[in-house]
Amino acid sequence: MKGGLAPNATVMSWCGEKGGIQAAKQHHDVIMTPRTHNYFNFYHVEDKVNEPLAFDEFLPLEKVYS
């Protein structure tokens, strides 16, 4: 967004929602992947002992699916 967009650009907004909303208002296709719901490299269960290594944040799958 900072350098301008090509006329047919699709924007993926993952560092918050502001950029995606701005792009949609400019009639671009937008994929919203906010950190609060769409980071699959976080732990999805509270018991991390038996889970694969992930970033040390907890994001329950129920929230992802919501």
Image (cartoon, helix red, strand yellow):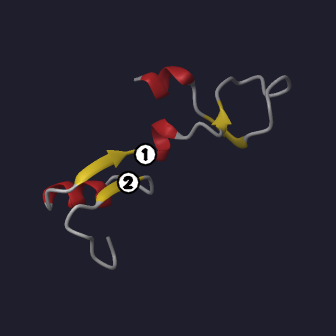
Side of 43 relative to 27 (left or right) = right
Residue that sits furthest to the front in the current view: 8
Is residue 62 positioned above or below 7 on the image? above
Mark 1 crowd level (few <14, some 14–19, many ≥20, 10 Å Cα):
some
Figure quadrant of the C terminus: top left
Is residue 28 positioned above or below 65 on the image? below
Instruction: Write the residue at 42% across / 44% down.
Output: 33
> Which x, y percent locates residue 31?
34, 46
Residue position for label 1:
34
Q: Amino acid at mark 2?
A: Ser
> Label 1's element?
loop
Instruction: Write the residue at 35% across / 45% down.
Output: 32
> Which x, y percent locates residue 13?
38, 54
Residue that sits furthest to the right in the current view: 49
Residue position for label 2:
13
Q: Residue 21 appears in which quarter of the rendering?
A: bottom left
> Which x, y percent locates residue 7?
19, 67
> Label 2's element?
strand
- In front of the other: 41 or 30: 30
Q: Residue 47 appears in which quarter of the rendering?
A: top right
Q: Amino acid at mark 1?
A: Pro
Q: CA distance from mark 1 to mark 2?
A: 7 Å
The answer to which of marks 1 and 2 sits earlier in the sequence is 2
Q: Are marks 1 and 2 in contact (CB under 8 Å)?
A: yes
